């Protein structure tokens, strides 16, 4: 069973980002040409990918803040009375 078209587009975008290409227009063109899909489809999927990555980043930031908060509590010096 093959991957859905949107996942193939996302994977191809990530490959180009990994190669150091950062210009959106260049990525859209390369992906559309390589996969023979319409450029608007690539742009739509790229937007979906960006939102997914932003959600992951927000989740990781929340986890980091939670862990840092726990570390602060556990490393707080005991009060001397």
Image (tube, grey):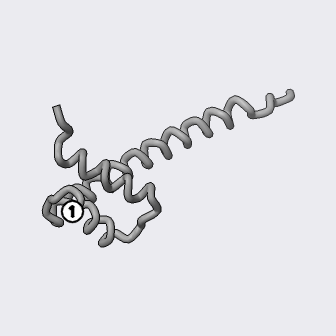
Residue drawn at the location 17% of the way across and 66% of the way down: 39
Percent coordinates x, y for residue 16 in the rendering: 38, 58
Residue drawn at the location 26% of the way across and 60% of the way down: 31
User: Residue furthest toward the right?
Assistant: 81
Quadrant housing the N terminus: top left
Residue drawn at the location 27% of the way across and 58% of the way down: 46
Mark 1 element type = helix
Residue drawn at the location 54% of the way across and 37% of the way down: 66
The number of callouts visible is 1
Toward the viewer: 38 or 79?
A: 38
- The quadrant holding residue 29 is bottom left
Toward the viewer: 65 or 2?
A: 2
Quadrant housing the C terminus: top right
User: Residue furthest toward the left?
Assistant: 38
Percent coordinates x, y for residue 24 in the rendering: 33, 69
Can you say whether 4 is above or below 19 in the image? above
Toward the viewer: 59 or 24?
A: 24
Q: Residues within 10 Å of mark 1 (few under 14, many from 20)?
A: some
- The quadrant holding residue 22 is bottom left
List the residue tagged with mark 1.
32
* 17 lies left or right of 31: right
Toward the viewer: 20 or 68?
A: 20
Percent coordinates x, y for residue 47 in the rendering: 26, 59
């Amino acid at each position: 069973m093959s991957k859905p078209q949107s996942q193939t587009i996302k994977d191809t975008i990530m490959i180009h980002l990994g190669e150091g290409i950062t210009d959106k227009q260049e990525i859209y063109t390369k992906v559309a040409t390589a996969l023979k899909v319409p450029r608007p489809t690539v742009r739509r999927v790229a937007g979906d990918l960006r939102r997914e990555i932003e959600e992951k980043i927000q989740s990781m930031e929340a986890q980091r803040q939670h862990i840092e908060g726990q570390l602060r509590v556990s490393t707080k010096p005991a009060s001397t009375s």
